[in-house]
Image: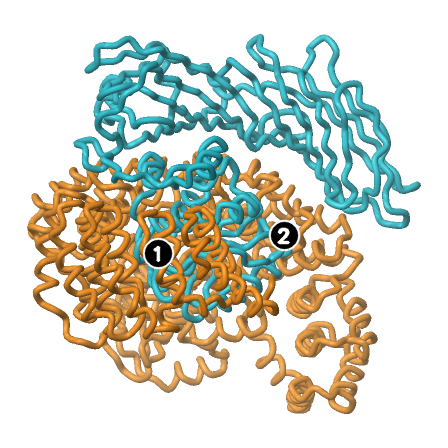
């Protein structure tokens, strides 16, 4: 199925290869490099490239291309999801998935790849099970390892897949029994010049960290479950009960996992937390322009907007920006033509404003396209859709667990047109 | 990377590895081994250390073992004789009490790709198949496939195949799936693993124990199974129902494919499955990973071929974000074009308009072309936008707009007047050859409606010496000749200059030949030239014919969830049409050839009698008259209803829609009313006269009489023709009443 995997960095260096069947020469990547060159931006490389004898399916993540070589017909979504899983596993193990961490941990990387695929077929991809086969490196453990010479490989086989519930290993024991849930919502929105919503939807996930002994059977209920349009669950959730009673009933996997993801697209339900008043104009003569941006709170349900960052992709002819920010710092990168204004906390009494002039390349015509603004923000303790967890009950075990729910709202692809 | 110093490095490493002091210190020893592996992954040839590494495999440290195995697998094929030395250690490990070591050793032994391995690995594999640890069984099952691939041409070992089939009942789900995978590889020449009823039902019952990868693969294997009865079919479908909404897109899509395949005889079930999967598909289109989004969009596009309305209300999901990669934006635009309806057209056009000024010229051009496609249905609004874009005076935009105009005029002739007005008023001209060709085509084809046409063309003729593209020159020749035919006085002089230049000075043979062709043609006389050069223009019924039709699901379900649509080799008809439209001149000629305009009709009167009519090359009045007088009337029939009161244009268009050409008819209410029509059918030419109110003809007072002549005779075709004609006229009568 998946014949080989090549990892290629942004500069086009192939820094890791792994073959699960016969060895395929690196030269197959020339087709990839060709496509990479044609695409100019690394983002634009098409995910599926056809070569005379193979298909190359690639994903681009954290400035690394994961290029897989396929020889027979396969479902493309399968391979793409698998490659993402590989990247996620690296992230999980090393804290970040970058060229340097992969090179530093090359031994573990090979161990992982060996366990995740055999003969080109996916074997163990659940992080629970992998972590029992190959222990992730920690600073403490690597110190202990250097002193004692022990290794970070589990001595026994994972029991997880042999228990009656495939995603949970048997005989889990904790001294502190705790279950935490994070409701994370991302707003994807496009606002037009006048501030009206062109398109808005909420992508939400509930991440869980469950450390409970034994075989707990949990039930999570919401105050307002009807809000959710499309939901998809971790395989552990009993779908029938959701359909009939709108509660989430499940035997959780051990550790961190994503319980569910959902989607709210009804436009009247999607609140837009901030408004942006902007005026970016370029003059016909004098090769200069003016920029004036003000951000203010709109529907924040009384919470504070934090981590506010405005990013503007300027037209190519903009050479420099001479601006004045009433709050936060701004930075204009003349190479990438990106203006980043890091505001921080939004104070509703004193609205942050960025104002000043832009200087353009002299002689160049006035740019046609208007730059668009990307906004990043964070609101703690609020799920912007209004989703609220009602209660969490546990059956099947006798102890009393510690429970907690956290809400956070972030901007996803939040864009303002000018 | 130290490619050059490799010898030094290898020497140093060998010294270290064979140093007894180092060997005694586990930690230092392992560090050196790690170093070897690191060099190996960087592409340095460290195969010379093979002997030292084999020695290092005799250890209790699993990580060290893994590293050495990795090393051995990489170099085994280069050093087969040395690798044999390692096999003993590996075979010993296969009997280790720790199942992890057993599995590891077995897997790596199978990975040695060198001849003669089979005799050493067969016995451990067979033992591994019966191992009590599932980890080892998983490895052993795939080992069977690897063993087979070492000797692909040998006979298949029946006992192993049987054993694998038996292991399909293994309690460990991964073993089950690995069995399928291994059998598929081993039995590739015989058509792969056989899925019979017990196996299919066993797999279906195990589905929920499998991980998502395995589910997806099992669903693909199940495509081979055909249920015996409808009851069984619905049992299977209800077992699979929950997987349609799986949180893993690849499982949901694989399930959908299986649904479509199994329920091919039950369109309602298929439609229901599509409806239910639309939610996960849309979610994939909004996934965080751009590659997943792209794959989702490709699948949505395929589904839309049969169910264009399914995503209609979600059109906003397909609006492009600024930072999305262009391959996603292209797909989204293609989808948006398909989703346009009366309610959202204004918003979609507004959205597409904003893409027209995108930084990337390809994207801007694609957006303009998309507006052009919508213009075939909503011409007025789109023409406004396109005209506005010309005002931006950007070269690539102007060029794309002109090309769009050209295609629009061809597909939707009613917009000709508006387009001509805009083109006439447009001051700057496109700079690239594609755009120039499009402009010239418009000038030539509709020169009579663009007042400034000769002057624009003169500019091109004057600049001919600096023109590089021969395609533009050819188009210029054709356009100039066409223009000469409709506006001779203004064009004669420049056409002369153009022909002279192209014949005398042009170096490109194709251009010269084309010029000579036109020159000789003009020598034959203007009328002759007119007949050849200005054939019938595009036919107004074409937009109806090229309109999007719902395709049956069977058209695309075989490529659903495969690589084809993503790699772009699955050209849906609409993209094929636009790519053909890029060459208008050759398209124009093709379209008017008889075989390409065939249309198959089944008449409502006699369903089994199908007849195909075609337009074919037009007949001149003289030929028609001559044939009409020469031939005998073969068939005369009173149709039983009066002539339609519709306007002459409507009548003509309606007849053309069913491929009947109108030659002439008497105006309005004159009595007797007559019309002459003709058409072609398989190998024959049918001529007909419609008559009403003639005193001499019996029964023509109140009703139409049709007389048919034909050459050569084909009674079947006549019957078909009459029934088609009848249904068209009846429809018109109903409409005008």
In the rendering, which numbered label is found on residue A59?
none
Camera-nearest residue between B458 and B147: B147
Q: Which quadrant of the view contains residue B655?
A: bottom left
Camera-nearest residue between B379 and A193: A193
Cβ atoms under marks 1 and 2 closer than 8 Å? no
Q: Which quadrant of the view contains residue A360?
A: top right
- From this viewpoint, is residue B538 visible? yes
Name the image quarter holding the C terminus of chain B: top left
Kindly report which numbered mark, 1 or 2, lies closer to the viewer in this rendering.
Answer: 2
Name the image quarter holding the N terminus of chain B: bottom right
Above or below, comparing residue B726 to residue A385 in the picture? below
Residue at x 44%, y 66% (from the top left corner): B49
- SS for dot 2: loop
- SS for dot 1: loop
Residue at x 31%, y 56% (from the top left corner): B58
**Where does label 2 land, which residue?**
A41
From the rendered image, report the letter of the chain displayed in orange: B
Q: CA distance from mark 1 to mark 2?
A: 27 Å
Q: Is residue A34 left or right of residue A6?
A: right
Chain A appears in which tint?
cyan
């Amino acid at each position: 199925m998946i014949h080989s995997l090549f990892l290629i960095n942004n500069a086009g260096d192939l820094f890791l290869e792994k073959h699960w069947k016969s060895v395929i020469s690196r030269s197959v990547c020339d087709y990839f490099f060709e496509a990479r060159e044609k695409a100019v931006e690394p983002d634009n490389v098409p995910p599926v490239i056809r070569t005379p004898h193979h298909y190359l399916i690639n994903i681009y993540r954290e400035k690394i291309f994961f290029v897989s070589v396929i020889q027979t017909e396969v479902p493309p979504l399968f391979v793409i999801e698998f490659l993402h899983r590989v990247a996620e596993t690296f992230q999980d193990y090393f804290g970040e998935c970058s060229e340097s961490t992969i090179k530093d941990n090359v031994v573990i990387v090979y161990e992982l790849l060996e366990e995740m695929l055999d003969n080109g077929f996916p074997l163990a991809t659940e992080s629970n099970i992998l972590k029992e086969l190959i222990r992730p490196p920690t600073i403490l453990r690597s110190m202990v390892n250097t002193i004692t010479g022990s290794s970070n490989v589990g001595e026994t086989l994972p029991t997880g897949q042999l228990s009656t519930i495939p995603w949970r290993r048997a005989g889990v024991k904790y001294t502190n029994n705790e279950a935490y849930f994070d409701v994370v919502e991302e707003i994807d929105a496009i606002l037009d010049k006048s501030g009206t919503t062109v398109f808005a939807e909420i992508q939400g996930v509930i991440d869980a960290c469950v450390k409970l002994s034994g075989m707990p059977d949990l039930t999570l209920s919401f105050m307002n479950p009807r809000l959710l349009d499309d939901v998809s669950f971790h395989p552990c959730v009993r779908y029938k009960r959701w359909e009939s009673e709108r509660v989430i009933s499940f035997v959780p996997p051990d550790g961190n996992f994503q319980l569910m993801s959902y989607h709210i697209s009804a436009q009247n339900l999607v609140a837009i937390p901030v408004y942006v008043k902007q005026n970016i104009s370029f003059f016909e003569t004098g090769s200069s322009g003016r920029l004036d941006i003000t951000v203010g709170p709109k529907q924040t349900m009384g919470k504070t907007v934090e981590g506010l960052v405005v990013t503007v992709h300027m037209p190519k002819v903009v050479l420099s920006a001479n601006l004045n920010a009433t709050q936060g710092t701004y930075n204009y990168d003349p190479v990438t033509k990106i203006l980043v204004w890091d505001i921080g906390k939004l104070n509703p009494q004193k609205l942050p404003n960025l104002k000043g002039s832009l200087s353009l390349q002299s002689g160049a015509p006035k740019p046609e396209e208007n730059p668009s603004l990307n906004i990043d923000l964070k609101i703690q303790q609020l799920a912007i859709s209004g989703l609220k967890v009602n209660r969490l009950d546990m059956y099947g075990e006798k102890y009393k667990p510690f429970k907690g729910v956290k809400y956070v709202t972030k901007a996803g692809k939040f864009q303002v047109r000018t | 990377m130290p490619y050059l110093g490799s010898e030094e490095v290898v020497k140093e490493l060998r010294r270290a590895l064979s140093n007894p002091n180092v060997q005694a210190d586990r930690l230092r020893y392992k560090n050196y081994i790690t170093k070897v592996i690191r060099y190996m992954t960087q592409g340095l040839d460290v195969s010379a250390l093979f002997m030292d590494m084999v020695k290092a495999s005799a250890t209790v440290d699993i990580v060290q073992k893994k590293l050495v195995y990795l090393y051995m697998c990489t170099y085994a094929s280069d050093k087969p004789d040395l690798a044999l030395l390692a096999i003993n250690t590996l075979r010993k490990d296969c009997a280790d009490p720790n199942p992890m070591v057993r599995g590891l050793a077995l897997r790596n032994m199978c990975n040695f790709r060198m001849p003669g391995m089979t005799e050493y690995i067969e016995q451990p594999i067979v033992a591994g198949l019966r191992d009590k640890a599932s980890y080892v069984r998983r490895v052993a099952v795939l080992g069977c496939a690897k063993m087979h691939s070492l000797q692909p041409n040998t006979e298949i070992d029946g006992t192993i195949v049987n054993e694998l089939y038996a292991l399909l009942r293994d309690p460990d789900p991964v073993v089950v799936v690995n069995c399928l995978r291994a059998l598929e590889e081993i039995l590739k020449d015989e058509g792969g693993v056989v899925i019979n009823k017990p196996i299919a039902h066993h797999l279906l019952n195990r589905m929920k124990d499998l991980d998502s990868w395995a589910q997806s693969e099992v669903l693909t294997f199940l495509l081979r199974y055909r249920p015996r009865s409808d009851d069984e079919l619905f049992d299977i479908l209800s077992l699979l129902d929950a997987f349609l909404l799986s949180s893993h897109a690849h499982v949901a899509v694989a399930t959908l494919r299986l649904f479509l395949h199994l329920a091919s005889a039950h369109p309602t079930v298929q439609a229901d499955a599509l409806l239910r999967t639309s939610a996960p598909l849309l979610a994939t289109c909004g996934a965080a990973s751009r590659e997943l989004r792209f794959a989702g969009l490709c699948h949505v596009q395929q589904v839309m071929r049969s169910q264009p309305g399914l995503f209609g209300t979600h059109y906003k999901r397909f609006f492009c974000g600024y930072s999305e990669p262009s391959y996603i934006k292209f797909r989204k635009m293609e989808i948006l074009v398909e989703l346009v309806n009366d309610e959202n057209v204004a918003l979609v056009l507004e959205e597409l308009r904003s893409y027209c000024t995108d930084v990337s010229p390809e994207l801007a051009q694609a957006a303009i072309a998309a507006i052009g496609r919508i213009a075939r249905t909503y011409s007025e609004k789109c023409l406004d936008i396109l005209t506005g874009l010309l005002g931006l005076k950007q070269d690539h935009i102007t060029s794309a707009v002109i090309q769009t105009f050209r295609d629009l005029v061809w597909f939707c002739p009613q917009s000709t007047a508006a387009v001509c007005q805009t083109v006439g008023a447009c001051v700057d001209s496109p700079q690239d050859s594609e755009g120039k060709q499009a402009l010239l085509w418009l000038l030539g084809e509709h020169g009579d409606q663009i007042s400034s046409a000769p002057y624009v063309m003169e500019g091109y003729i004057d600049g001919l010496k600096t023109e590089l593209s021969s395609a533009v020159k050819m188009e210029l020749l054709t356009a100039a000749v066409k223009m000469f035919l409709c506006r001779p006085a203004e064009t004669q002089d420049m056409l002369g200059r153009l022909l002279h230049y192209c014949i005398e000075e042009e170096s490109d043979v194709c251009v010269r030949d084309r010029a000579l062709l036109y020159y000789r043609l003009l020598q034959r006389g203007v009328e002759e030239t007119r007949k050849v050069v200005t054939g019938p223009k595009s036919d107004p019924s074409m937009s109806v014919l090229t309109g999007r039709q719902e395709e049956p699901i069977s058209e695309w379900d075989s490529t659903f969830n495969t690589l084809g649509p993503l790699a772009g080799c699955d050209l849906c008809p609409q993209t094929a049409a636009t790519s053909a439209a890029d060459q208008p001149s050759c398209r124009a000629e093709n379209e008017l050839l008889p075989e390409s305009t065939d249309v198959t009709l089944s008449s409502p009167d006699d369903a089994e009698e199908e007849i195909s009519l075609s337009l074919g090359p037009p007949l001149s009045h003289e030929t028609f008259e001559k044939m009409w007088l020469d031939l005998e009337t073969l068939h005369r029939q009173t149709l039983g209803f009066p002539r339609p009161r519709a306007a002459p244009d409507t009548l003509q268009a309606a007849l053309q829609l069913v491929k009947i050409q109108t030659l002439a008819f008497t105006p309005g209410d004159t009595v007797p009313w007559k019309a002459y029509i003709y058409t072609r059918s398989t190998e024959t030419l049918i001529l007909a006269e419609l008559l009403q109110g003639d005193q001499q003809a019996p029964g023509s007072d109140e009703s139409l009489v049709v007389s048919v002549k034909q050459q050569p005779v084909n009674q079947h075709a006549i019957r078909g023709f009459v029934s088609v004609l009848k249904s068209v006229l009846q429809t018109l009568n109903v409409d005008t009443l």
